[in-house]
Amino acid sequence: EDQVTQSPEALRLQEGESSSLNCSYTVSGLRGLFWYRQDPGKGPEFLFTLYSAGEEKEKERLKATLTKKESFLHITAPKPEDSATYLCASGGAGSYQLTFGKGTKLSVIP
Amino acid sequence: NAGVTQTPKFQVLKTGQSMTLQCAQDMNHNSMYWYRQDPGMGLRLIYYSASEGTTDKGEVPNGYNVSRLNKREFSLRLESAAPSQTSVYFCAAMTGTTQETQYFGPGTRLLVL
């Protein structure tokens, strides 16, 4: 059974204080590892897809990396507008389904 | 280009009532999905449709039915609502290309009394 575990559950950062969110996954044949951002009262917004170990993708202050067992979302010099819940999901080979983690709620304090 | 749209945005039902949640996408994507999101449980897949004319059960299908009306529309029906179905429901569509990007709608908040 595919599993995705995200840590920490919640993270409070001062503006400008860089940190990382962790996503551990177990899946039979990884098709893709997905990161989403979700603001309160809204649907998840797609950020990144990673396909193989060693792959990295960046978008503004966010950088996602992938190993064979984990993915990290690095946040560099965060701003208050980066406050949101970040979701990680894995997709297995030959499957149309995604398995989601419970998310990390990030709060960036001015 | 609205992406994925859902109606209604909010609904209150009494136990035993039925209703249909509507979802439409204008991105010409093949796959469509229905999830529910509950506090502390994350997103859980209810049903999905890999392509027009096909539907399959996800992790939590009991108490729900779906219809893939055409390539654009995928509806979720609650035949006899229960308080345990109080949740936020999200519809999503996926490209099916190598990029595998999944787009979500804004959600329907359902309260069953």
Image (cartoon, coloured by chain):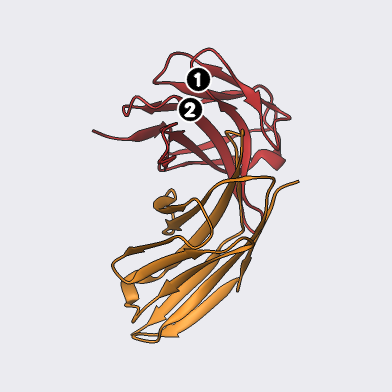
Chain colours: A orange, B red
- Disc 1 vs disc 2: Cβ atoms closer than 8 Å? yes
* Discs 1 and 2 share one subunit: yes
Q: Residue placed at 41% from the left, 59% from the top?
A: A39
Q: Residue placed at 64% from the left, 62% from the top?
A: A69
The quadrant holding residue B60 is top right
Q: Give, as a three-letter code, the residue at label 2.
A: Ser
Asked if A102 appears above or below B71 in the picture, the reply is below
Q: In what element is the residue under mark 2?
A: strand
**Where residue A77 sits in the image (x, y, percent)?**
33, 82
Q: In what element is the residue under mark 1?
A: loop
Q: Residue placed at 46% from the left, 81% from the top?
A: A19
Q: Residue furthest right?
A: A1
Q: Residue placed at 39% from the left, 68% from the top?
A: A63
Q: Give, as a three-letter code, the residue at label 1.
A: Ser
**Where residue A88 sits in the image (x, y, percent)?**
54, 57
* Callout 1: chain: B
Residue nearest the observer in this picture, B95 or B108? B95
The C terminus of chain B, quarter of image: top right
**Where residue B34 sits in the image (x, y, percent)?**
55, 34
Regarding residue B13, the answer to whether it shows in the image is: yes
The N terminus of chain B, quarter of image: top left
Question: Can you identify the residue that label 2 sits on?
Answer: B31
Residue nearest the observer in this picture, A110 or A79? A79
* Callout 2: chain: B
Residue nearest the observer in this picture, B43 or A76? A76
Q: What label sits on residue B51 in the rendered view?
A: 1
